[in-house]
Image (cartoon, helix red, strand yellow):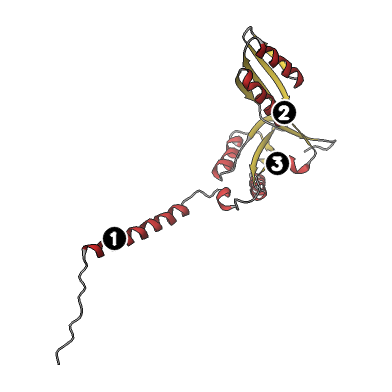
């Protein structure tokens, strides 16, 4: 009996194109998976995107020593946390203590992560979420420069009086107003000044303190 001859399949040009296409598709899929794994470990990538985003004001007492502010900023940038506003100044000269006020945004889970990470830093004495206390005063100072004459000039002065903004510099063609208040008030004032010849704005950022006799 004659032996069985195994069938030999010869790849045609069309078959080779199909194999190459499947190989490239598999390579692209592996590359996509690798790129996802190499993304930065930001809390915003790990959290549920459907959670509501909140703005919180954090007061942080730290030892006034070189590099503290850089370490705090590095914590935010390294983990992808957002900073809307940041102010810092020495508040207790004899104890060498500085107070950092940070306005940040994120989901409740992200805000908790930020507070825990800050609290674990060595030069940090205390972290207080002023938004959660519900008993804080927040203020910001802004200097607003306008250029204009005629009716625009008169209207700008009228609005400044309504917002209790005062003129700290004036020429025949321009004004510089100083306004103090919460961020919403300052934003509203700036928006009203835009059509009247707004040139530039300089803002200090938010400073916050708790109400009542107790300290931080």
- Mark 2 vs mark 3: which is more N-terminal? 3
| Labelled pair 2, 1 in contact (Cβ < 8 Å) | no
What kind of element bears circle 3?
Answer: strand
What residue is at 70 percent from the left and 42 percent from the top? 127
Percent of width and height locating residue 190 = 66, 24
* Comes first in the chain, label 1 or label 3: 1
Residue 83 circle label: none
What residue is shown with label 1? 20
- Element under label 1? helix
Using the image as rendered, state which of residue 133 and residue 180 is in the foreground.
Answer: 180
Quarter of the image containing the C terminus? top right
- Given this view, does label 2 or label 3 mark the residue nearer the observer? 2
The front one of 91 and 44 is: 44
Crowd class of label 3 (few under 14; some 14 to 19; many from 20; radius 10 Å): some
Mark 1 → mark 3, Cα distance in angstroms? 61 Å
Please provide percent x and percent y for residue 198: 61, 19
Looking at marks 2 and 1 on the same chain, the residue that comes earlier in the sequence is marked by 1
Q: CA distance from mark 2 to mark 3?
A: 32 Å
**Which of the two discs, 1 and 3, sits closer to the camera?**
1
State the residue at coordinates (31%, 59%).
Answer: 21
Which of these two is toward me, 16 or 85? 16
Q: Which residue matches tag 2?
A: 185
Q: Which residue has dot 3 on it?
A: 125
Where is residue 157 drawn, in percent x and y? 71, 14
Please state, as top left, top right, bottom left or bottom right, where the N terminus lies in the image.
bottom left
Above or below, 141 relative to 146: below
Whether label 2 touches label 3, CB < 8 Å: no
Q: Counting other residues with Cα less than 10 Å from the Cα at mark 1, is it few (<14), some (14-19), or many (20 or more)? A: few
Furthest toward the left, the residue is 2
User: For the view shown, which residue lies furthest in the top direction?
Assistant: 172
């Amino acid at each position: 009996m004659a032996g069985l001859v195994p069938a030999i399949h010869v790849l045609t040009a069309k078959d080779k194109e199909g194999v190459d296409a499947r190989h490239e598709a598999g390579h692209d899929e592996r590359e996509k998976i690798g790129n996802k794994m190499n993304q930065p470990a930001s809390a915003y990538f790990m959290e549920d995107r459907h959670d509501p985003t909140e703005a919180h004001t954090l007061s942080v007492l730290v030892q006034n020593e070189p590099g503290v502010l850089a370490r705090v900023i590095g914590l935010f940038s390294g983990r992808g946390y957002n900073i809307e506003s940041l102010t810092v100044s020495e508040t207790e000269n004899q104890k060498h203590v500085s107070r950092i006020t940070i306005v940040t945004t994120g989901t409740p889970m992200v805000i908790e992560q930020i507070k825990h990470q800050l609290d674990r830093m060595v030069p940090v004495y205390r972290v207080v979420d002023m938004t959660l206390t519900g008993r804080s005063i927040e203020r910001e100072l802004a200097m607003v420069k306008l250029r204009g004459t005629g009716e625009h000039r008169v209207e700008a002065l009228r609005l400044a009086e309504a917002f209790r903004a005062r003129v700290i510099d004036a020429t025949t063609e321009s004004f510089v107003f100083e306004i103090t208040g919460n961020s919403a008030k300052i934003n509203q004032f700036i928006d009203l000044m835009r059509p009247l010849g707004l040139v530039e704005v300089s803002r200090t950022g938010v400073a916050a303190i708790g109400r009542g006799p107790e300290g931080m």
